[in-house]
Image: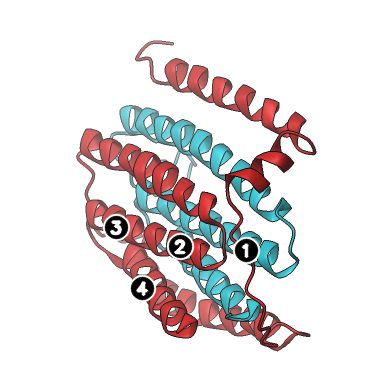
Chain colours: A cyan, B red
Protein backbone atom coordinates (compact mmCIF):
# COMPACT_ATOMS: atom_id res chain seq x y z
CA UNK A 1 0.00 0.00 0.00
CA UNK A 2 1.39 3.34 -1.04
CA UNK A 3 1.80 5.74 1.92
CA UNK A 4 -0.47 8.74 2.04
CA UNK A 5 2.32 11.29 1.61
CA UNK A 6 2.75 10.43 -2.06
CA UNK A 7 -0.94 10.82 -2.83
CA UNK A 8 -0.84 14.18 -1.08
CA UNK A 9 2.15 15.16 -3.19
CA UNK A 10 0.23 14.38 -6.37
CA UNK A 11 -2.64 16.46 -5.01
CA UNK A 12 -0.21 19.32 -4.31
CA UNK A 13 1.22 19.22 -7.83
CA UNK A 14 -2.23 19.14 -9.45
CA UNK A 15 -3.38 22.04 -7.28
CA UNK A 16 -0.35 24.14 -8.16
CA UNK A 17 -0.82 23.43 -11.85
CA UNK A 18 -4.42 24.61 -11.50
CA UNK A 19 -3.24 27.80 -9.82
CA UNK A 20 -0.71 28.47 -12.59
CA UNK A 21 -3.44 27.89 -15.18
CA UNK A 22 -5.77 30.38 -13.51
CA UNK A 23 -3.06 33.00 -13.23
CA UNK A 24 -1.40 32.80 -16.64
CA UNK A 25 -4.13 31.96 -19.16
CA UNK A 26 -6.37 34.61 -20.67
CA UNK A 27 -9.00 32.35 -22.17
CA UNK A 28 -11.89 32.28 -19.69
CA UNK A 29 -12.72 28.65 -20.47
CA UNK A 30 -9.19 27.47 -19.74
CA UNK A 31 -9.20 29.46 -16.49
CA UNK A 32 -12.38 27.62 -15.57
CA UNK A 33 -10.84 24.27 -16.43
CA UNK A 34 -7.90 25.09 -14.15
CA UNK A 35 -10.38 25.76 -11.34
CA UNK A 36 -11.80 22.29 -11.91
CA UNK A 37 -8.26 20.93 -11.72
CA UNK A 38 -7.86 22.56 -8.30
CA UNK A 39 -11.13 21.04 -7.10
CA UNK A 40 -9.99 17.61 -8.20
CA UNK A 41 -6.71 18.01 -6.37
CA UNK A 42 -8.64 18.77 -3.18
CA UNK A 43 -10.87 15.74 -3.78
CA UNK A 44 -7.80 13.55 -4.10
CA UNK A 45 -6.47 14.85 -0.79
CA UNK A 46 -9.81 14.14 0.90
CA UNK A 47 -9.95 10.57 -0.36
CA UNK A 48 -6.31 9.95 0.59
CA UNK A 49 -7.04 11.03 4.15
CA UNK A 50 -10.24 9.00 4.21
CA UNK A 51 -8.25 5.87 3.54
CA UNK A 52 -5.49 6.78 5.94
CA UNK A 53 -7.76 7.57 8.89
CA UNK A 54 -10.16 4.70 8.10
CA UNK A 55 -13.13 7.06 8.03
CA UNK A 56 -15.50 7.21 5.10
CA UNK A 57 -16.41 10.79 6.00
CA UNK A 58 -13.76 12.07 3.63
CA UNK A 59 -15.47 10.30 0.78
CA UNK A 60 -18.86 11.74 1.73
CA UNK A 61 -17.31 15.20 1.57
CA UNK A 62 -15.95 14.41 -1.90
CA UNK A 63 -19.47 13.38 -2.90
CA UNK A 64 -20.75 16.80 -1.90
CA UNK A 65 -17.81 18.60 -3.53
CA UNK A 66 -18.63 16.84 -6.79
CA UNK A 67 -22.30 17.82 -6.61
CA UNK A 68 -21.49 21.45 -5.84
CA UNK A 69 -18.80 21.50 -8.55
CA UNK A 70 -21.34 20.31 -11.10
CA UNK A 71 -23.73 23.11 -10.13
CA UNK A 72 -20.90 25.63 -10.16
CA UNK A 73 -19.68 24.59 -13.61
CA UNK A 74 -23.17 24.95 -15.03
CA UNK A 75 -23.67 28.43 -13.62
CA UNK A 76 -20.09 29.52 -14.40
CA UNK A 77 -20.36 28.45 -18.02
CA UNK A 78 -23.60 30.34 -18.52
CA UNK A 79 -21.93 33.40 -17.02
CA UNK A 80 -19.08 33.01 -19.54
CA UNK A 81 -21.64 32.75 -22.33
CA UNK A 82 -23.35 35.94 -21.10
CA UNK A 83 -19.97 37.66 -20.95
CA UNK A 84 -19.28 36.57 -24.51
CA UNK A 85 -22.61 37.97 -25.65
CA UNK A 86 -21.84 41.28 -24.00
CA UNK A 87 -18.16 41.82 -24.69
CA UNK A 88 -17.74 39.77 -27.86
CA UNK A 89 -14.76 37.71 -26.73
CA UNK A 90 -13.81 35.33 -23.95
CA UNK A 91 -10.46 36.97 -23.38
CA UNK A 92 -10.51 37.98 -19.73
CA UNK A 93 -8.39 41.01 -20.53
CA UNK A 94 -11.17 42.32 -22.78
CA UNK A 95 -13.75 42.29 -19.98
CA UNK A 96 -12.31 45.54 -18.75
CA UNK A 97 -14.41 48.64 -18.14
CA UNK A 98 -11.76 50.47 -16.14
CA UNK A 99 -10.91 53.94 -17.34
CA UNK A 100 -7.17 53.41 -17.83
CA UNK B 1 2.91 -3.82 -7.77
CA UNK B 2 0.81 -1.15 -6.11
CA UNK B 3 3.75 1.22 -6.50
CA UNK B 4 3.95 0.65 -10.25
CA UNK B 5 0.28 1.40 -10.71
CA UNK B 6 0.48 4.45 -8.51
CA UNK B 7 3.50 5.95 -10.24
CA UNK B 8 2.10 5.30 -13.72
CA UNK B 9 -1.28 6.83 -12.85
CA UNK B 10 0.27 9.79 -11.06
CA UNK B 11 2.52 10.51 -14.04
CA UNK B 12 -0.44 10.41 -16.42
CA UNK B 13 -2.42 12.75 -14.16
CA UNK B 14 0.39 15.28 -13.78
CA UNK B 15 1.41 15.21 -17.45
CA UNK B 16 -2.12 15.71 -18.69
CA UNK B 17 -2.59 18.52 -16.14
CA UNK B 18 0.50 20.27 -17.51
CA UNK B 19 -0.89 19.84 -21.02
CA UNK B 20 -4.26 21.27 -19.93
CA UNK B 21 -2.74 24.57 -18.92
CA UNK B 22 -0.36 24.91 -21.86
CA UNK B 23 -2.44 24.09 -24.92
CA UNK B 24 -3.34 26.82 -27.39
CA UNK B 25 -6.73 25.44 -28.38
CA UNK B 26 -9.38 25.07 -25.67
CA UNK B 27 -10.68 21.83 -27.15
CA UNK B 28 -7.30 20.16 -26.65
CA UNK B 29 -7.26 21.46 -23.07
CA UNK B 30 -10.70 19.98 -22.46
CA UNK B 31 -9.66 16.59 -23.79
CA UNK B 32 -6.51 16.55 -21.69
CA UNK B 33 -8.59 17.51 -18.67
CA UNK B 34 -10.81 14.49 -19.34
CA UNK B 35 -7.67 12.33 -19.33
CA UNK B 36 -6.54 13.92 -16.07
CA UNK B 37 -9.94 13.31 -14.47
CA UNK B 38 -9.87 9.68 -15.53
CA UNK B 39 -6.39 9.31 -14.03
CA UNK B 40 -7.68 10.81 -10.77
CA UNK B 41 -10.56 8.31 -10.88
CA UNK B 42 -8.00 5.50 -11.12
CA UNK B 43 -6.20 7.04 -8.13
CA UNK B 44 -9.50 7.00 -6.23
CA UNK B 45 -9.82 3.33 -7.10
CA UNK B 46 -6.36 2.65 -5.70
CA UNK B 47 -7.42 4.41 -2.50
CA UNK B 48 -10.26 1.90 -2.09
CA UNK B 49 -12.90 4.49 -2.96
CA UNK B 50 -14.70 2.45 -5.58
CA UNK B 51 -17.99 4.33 -5.58
CA UNK B 52 -16.23 7.68 -5.83
CA UNK B 53 -14.12 6.44 -8.73
CA UNK B 54 -17.28 5.55 -10.63
CA UNK B 55 -18.88 8.87 -9.67
CA UNK B 56 -15.81 10.75 -10.86
CA UNK B 57 -16.02 9.13 -14.28
CA UNK B 58 -19.78 9.59 -14.60
CA UNK B 59 -20.17 13.09 -13.17
CA UNK B 60 -16.86 14.83 -13.81
CA UNK B 61 -15.52 13.26 -16.96
CA UNK B 62 -18.91 12.36 -18.33
CA UNK B 63 -21.14 15.34 -17.59
CA UNK B 64 -19.09 18.36 -16.60
CA UNK B 65 -16.52 18.03 -19.37
CA UNK B 66 -19.24 17.40 -21.95
CA UNK B 67 -20.75 20.70 -20.82
CA UNK B 68 -17.36 22.36 -21.31
CA UNK B 69 -17.00 20.99 -24.81
CA UNK B 70 -20.52 22.16 -25.70
CA UNK B 71 -19.76 25.68 -24.56
CA UNK B 72 -16.44 25.64 -26.45
CA UNK B 73 -18.39 24.72 -29.55
CA UNK B 74 -21.03 27.41 -28.88
CA UNK B 75 -18.52 30.19 -28.50
CA UNK B 76 -16.20 29.10 -31.34
CA UNK B 77 -13.53 29.52 -28.69
CA UNK B 78 -9.98 29.94 -29.73
CA UNK B 79 -6.96 31.31 -27.98
CA UNK B 80 -7.02 35.12 -27.94
CA UNK B 81 -4.44 36.95 -30.06
CA UNK B 82 -1.53 38.56 -28.28
CA UNK B 83 -1.89 42.23 -27.43
CA UNK B 84 0.63 44.72 -26.17
CA UNK B 85 -0.74 44.52 -22.63
CA UNK B 86 1.00 41.17 -22.17
CA UNK B 87 3.66 41.15 -19.45
CA UNK B 88 6.84 39.47 -20.61
CA UNK B 89 7.95 38.24 -17.22
CA UNK B 90 4.57 36.78 -16.26
CA UNK B 91 5.04 33.21 -17.43
CA UNK B 92 8.59 32.64 -16.11
CA UNK B 93 7.58 34.19 -12.79
CA UNK B 94 4.50 31.94 -12.62
CA UNK B 95 6.57 28.81 -13.32
CA UNK B 96 9.14 29.76 -10.72
CA UNK B 97 6.52 30.52 -8.07
CA UNK B 98 4.76 27.26 -8.92
CA UNK B 99 7.96 25.32 -8.27
CA UNK B 100 8.34 27.19 -5.00
CA UNK B 101 4.78 26.28 -3.98
CA UNK B 102 5.24 22.63 -4.94
CA UNK B 103 8.51 22.50 -2.98
CA UNK B 104 6.90 23.99 0.10
CA UNK B 105 3.67 21.97 0.09
CA UNK B 106 5.49 18.86 -1.10
CA UNK B 107 7.84 19.12 1.86
CA UNK B 108 4.85 19.24 4.19
CA UNK B 109 3.20 16.34 2.41
CA UNK B 110 6.19 14.04 2.21
CA UNK B 111 8.33 14.82 5.23
CA UNK B 112 5.75 15.40 7.94
CA UNK B 113 5.13 12.74 10.55
CA UNK B 114 4.10 9.33 9.37
CA UNK B 115 3.17 10.54 5.93
CA UNK B 116 5.59 8.16 4.24
CA UNK B 117 5.54 5.34 6.76
CA UNK B 118 4.59 2.23 4.88
CA UNK B 119 1.69 0.35 6.33
CA UNK B 120 1.07 -3.22 5.32
CA UNK B 121 -2.66 -3.48 5.94
CA UNK B 122 -4.78 -3.08 2.86
CA UNK B 123 -8.19 -1.64 3.55
CA UNK B 124 -11.46 -3.01 2.36
CA UNK B 125 -12.99 -1.19 -0.54
CA UNK B 126 -15.42 1.50 0.56
CA UNK B 127 -18.41 1.04 -1.64
CA UNK B 128 -21.95 2.22 -1.85
CA UNK B 129 -22.96 0.67 1.48
CA UNK B 130 -20.53 2.50 3.75
CA UNK B 131 -20.99 5.79 1.97
CA UNK B 132 -24.77 5.68 1.97
CA UNK B 133 -24.89 4.73 5.65
CA UNK B 134 -23.00 7.94 6.46
CA UNK B 135 -24.84 9.98 3.87
CA UNK B 136 -28.30 9.20 5.20
CA UNK B 137 -27.51 9.47 8.90
CA UNK B 138 -24.75 11.96 9.76
CA UNK B 139 -24.88 14.03 6.59
CA UNK B 140 -28.59 13.96 5.90
CA UNK B 141 -29.02 17.74 6.14
CA UNK B 142 -26.16 18.33 3.69
CA UNK B 143 -27.71 15.77 1.37
CA UNK B 144 -31.06 17.55 1.34
CA UNK B 145 -29.38 20.92 0.91
CA UNK B 146 -27.48 19.57 -2.10
CA UNK B 147 -30.77 18.96 -3.85
CA UNK B 148 -31.67 22.61 -3.20
CA UNK B 149 -28.30 23.68 -4.60
CA UNK B 150 -28.92 21.72 -7.77
CA UNK B 151 -32.37 23.27 -8.14
CA UNK B 152 -30.95 26.75 -7.65
CA UNK B 153 -28.26 26.02 -10.23
CA UNK B 154 -30.84 24.88 -12.75
CA UNK B 155 -33.02 27.95 -12.24
CA UNK B 156 -29.95 30.19 -12.37
CA UNK B 157 -28.74 28.71 -15.63
CA UNK B 158 -32.14 29.17 -17.28
CA UNK B 159 -32.45 32.76 -16.07
CA UNK B 160 -28.88 33.78 -16.93
CA UNK B 161 -29.11 32.16 -20.32
CA UNK B 162 -31.96 34.29 -21.54
CA UNK B 163 -31.15 36.87 -24.17
CA UNK B 164 -33.37 39.48 -22.59
CA UNK B 165 -33.71 39.21 -18.84
State whether residue A24 appears in this view: yes
Image quadrant of residue B141? top right
For marks 4 and 1 on the same chain, the one whose residue lies earlier in the sequence? 4
As measured in the structure, the alpha-carbon distance from the residue carrying label 4 to the one carrying label 2 is 9 Å
User: Which disc is residue B29 wearing?
Assistant: 3
How crowded is the residue under tag 4: few (<14 C-alpha within 10 Å), some, or many (20+)? some
Number of numbered discs visible in the structure rendering: 4
How crowded is the residue under tag 1: few (<14 C-alpha within 10 Å), some, or many (20+)? few
Q: State whether residue B53 is above or below residue B2.
A: above
Same-chain check, marks 1 and 2: yes
Give me the residue at 32% from left, 60% from top: B35
Same-chain check, marks 4 and 1: yes
Q: Which of pointers 1 and 2 indicates the residue nearer the eye?
A: 1
Q: Which residue is mark 2?
A: B40
For marks 3 and 2 on the same chain, the one whose residue lies earlier in the sequence? 3
- Labels 3 and 2 touching (C-beta < 8 A): no
Measuring from the top left, give residue B66's x and y in whole percent.
31, 40
Q: Which residue is mark 1?
A: B124
Q: Which of pointers 4 and 1 indicates the residue nearer the eye?
A: 1
As measured in the structure, the alpha-carbon distance from the residue carrying label 3 to the one carrying label 2 is 16 Å
For marks 1 and 2 on the same chain, the one whose residue lies earlier in the sequence? 2
For marks 3 and 4 on the same chain, the one whose residue lies earlier in the sequence? 4
For marks 4 and 2 on the same chain, the one whose residue lies earlier in the sequence? 4
Chain letter of mark 3 equals B
Q: Which of pointers 3 and 4 indicates the residue nearer the eye?
A: 4
Same-chain check, marks 4 and 2: yes
Q: Which residue is mark 4?
A: B12
Measuring from the top left, give residue A3's x and y in whole percent.
63, 81
Q: State whether residue B157 is above or below residue B50.
A: above
Amino acid sequence: MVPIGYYLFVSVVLFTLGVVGVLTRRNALIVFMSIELMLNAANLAFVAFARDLHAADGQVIVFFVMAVAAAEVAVGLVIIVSLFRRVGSIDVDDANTLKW
Amino acid sequence: MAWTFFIATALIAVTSAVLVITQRKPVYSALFLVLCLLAVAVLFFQLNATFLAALQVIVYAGAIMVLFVFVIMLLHAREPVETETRLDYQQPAAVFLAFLLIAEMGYLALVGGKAVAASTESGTATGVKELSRLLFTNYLLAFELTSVILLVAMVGVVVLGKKRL
